[in-house]
Image (cartoon, rainbow, N blue to C red):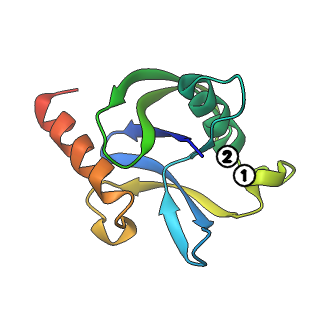
Amino acid sequence: MLISQGVILKDEYVLMVKQYVERGDIVWNFPGGEIENNETPEQAMVREVKEETGYLTKIIELLPCETGKFSFLAEIVSGEMQLDHTFPDNQDIVEIAWISIDDIDKFDAYTLPVRELLLQHLGAGI
């Protein structure tokens, strides 16, 4: 199963979804999900972010990440934040929020490497 996710930054905050995961925990993740048949990682990221957060996004670049996921730095084009539970795949999502990049407690072993890449990019002046 290949996963594609969007890393969307606004000021010093990153868009995240709080959700139940397979291991039974509730964690903060970047919005994203499984790449469907005949779908590119880019298309999957745009679709998943829209389904999970209500935002239409465009890709800035692919982050060079070793997490086994496609992590795209993206920006919002339109839409407003909303959690739509009519999408069956959104049943595991509890909350959507802008999380401070400095709120280290919200990041785990899966999201921390992407956070570190994001901080490197911020230092480089993205």
Q: Which residue is mark 2?
A: 52
Q: Is residue 47 left or right of residue 69?
A: right
- Name the one closer to the observer, 109 or 85: 109
Mark 2 and mark 1 lie on one chain; the one further toward the N terminus is 2
User: Residue, x 46% and y 22% (percent of image)?
Assistant: 59
Query: Where does residue 98 sit, x and y in percent of width and height?
Result: 46, 52
* Image quarter of residue 123: top left
**Front: mark 2 or 1:** 2
- Drawn side of residue 54 relative to residue 110, left or right: right
Of all residues, the one furthest to the bottom in this rendering is 24
Q: Is residue 44 above or below residue 21?
A: above
Q: Amino acid at mark 1?
A: Leu
Q: Mark 2 falls on what kind of element? A: helix
Q: Quadrant of residue 23?
A: bottom right
Q: Position of residue 74 (x, y in %)?
A: 44, 29
Q: Is residue 120 above or below residue 91?
A: above
Residue 114 percent location from the top left of the image:
32, 48
Nearest the viewer among 95 and 24 is: 24
Quadrant where the image shows the C terminus? top left
Instruction: Name the residue tied to disc 1.
Output: 83
Tell me which amino acid carries mark 2: Glu
Instruction: Tell me, yes or no, whether the two marked residues, 2 and 1, touch with CB atoms within 8 Å.
Output: yes
